[in-house]
Image (cartoon, rainbow, N blue to C red):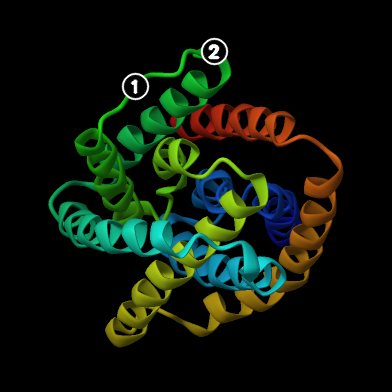
Amino acid sequence: MTIILYFIIILLTNMIQGITGFAGTVLAMPFCILLLGIGIAKPVLNILTIIACTLIVVRSYKHIVWKEFFKMTGIMFVGVFIGEYVYTLFPVDILLTLYAIFIIFIALKGLFVKKEFDLNEGILIGIILSAGIIHGMFISGGPLLIIYAVKKIKDKESFRATLSPVWIVLNIYILIKQLFLGIITVPMVNLVLIGIPALMIGVIIGGQMAKKMSQQTFMRLSYVLLLISGVSLII
């Protein structure tokens, strides 16, 4: 039953990843933490995210806005280093509670706050840095990064294509570190292999749906799923 639930989680969340380019890991992480434990969920989802984003980049690389890619990646790297350090300072239970509250806040904002706020460049850079910190702790910086990305990248296809290589670069760094520390185990590799078919099916379906349905509809769906996942994690 655990494997079946894991397969379903990877399938459904990567459908959203295929549509938006960012939501797959942050949606999957709370459920996979509950199902597998955080020590297993983080490395497994990190590898699966690299694969999912690579599929998106292969199909949409011509739409990447390189200036924004380099800017987001560079600033987020600084945040990742901070996030990794913060993760070692506090008990996991406290960090998970704060993470769940963060997810719920982002979801409620996306669902109910329609007003666009004028954010200066300093605040936007701070948002990217904060996204990196969250990514360093939970490999889930997407919800914060989109606050910046939606301000700078208006085209739907470019939005999706530009976010994906950011996650590839950051997550490969995290993967190299995990390999160096000996965190990756054979059972984790087996879970990755089980998840790859679900991931590929989800990304392909999501990519097709993204062409036919509005970005607004699926962003709203992403926020609803974020809310459910955050509440589930707190419970």
Observer-side mark, 2 or 1, equals 1
From the top left corner, tell me how far across and down residue 167 is, in percent.
Answer: 46, 63
Q: Residues within 10 Å of mark 2 (few under 14, many from 20)?
A: few
Instruction: Name the side, left or right, on which 21 lies relative to 40.
Output: right
For image coordinates 42% across by 76% down, the residue present is 172
Marks 2 and 1, the one that precedes in the sequence:
2
Residue that mark 1 sits on: 118
Does 198 appear above or below 83? below
For image coordinates 71% across by 64% down, the residue present is 199
Q: Secondary structure at mark 2?
A: helix
Q: Secondary structure at mark 1?
A: loop
For image coordinates 23% across by 34% down, the residue present is 123
Instruction: Name the side, left or right, on which 17 lies relative to 75.
Output: right
Does 113 appear above or below 222? above
In-front residue for pair 216/120: 120
Does 174 appear above or below 232? below
Q: How many marks?
A: 2
Does 108 appear above or below 190? above
Real-space CA distance between mark 2 and mark 1, rounded to the nearest whole angstrom: 18 Å
What amino acid is found at the position of numbered circle 2 in the picture? Answer: Phe
Asked whether residue 235 is in view, the answer is no
Residue that mark 2 sits on: 112
In-front residue for pair 234/165: 165
From the top left corner, tell me how far across and down residue 47 is, in percent.
Answer: 52, 72
Contact flag, marks 2 and 1 (Cβ < 8 Å): no
What amino acid is found at the position of numbered circle 1 in the picture? Answer: Asp
Residue 100: mark: none
Instruction: Name the side, left or right, on which 112 lies relative to 69.
Output: right
**Image quarter hosting the N terminus:** bottom right
Asked whether residue 11 is in view, the answer is yes
In-front residue for pair 213/14: 213
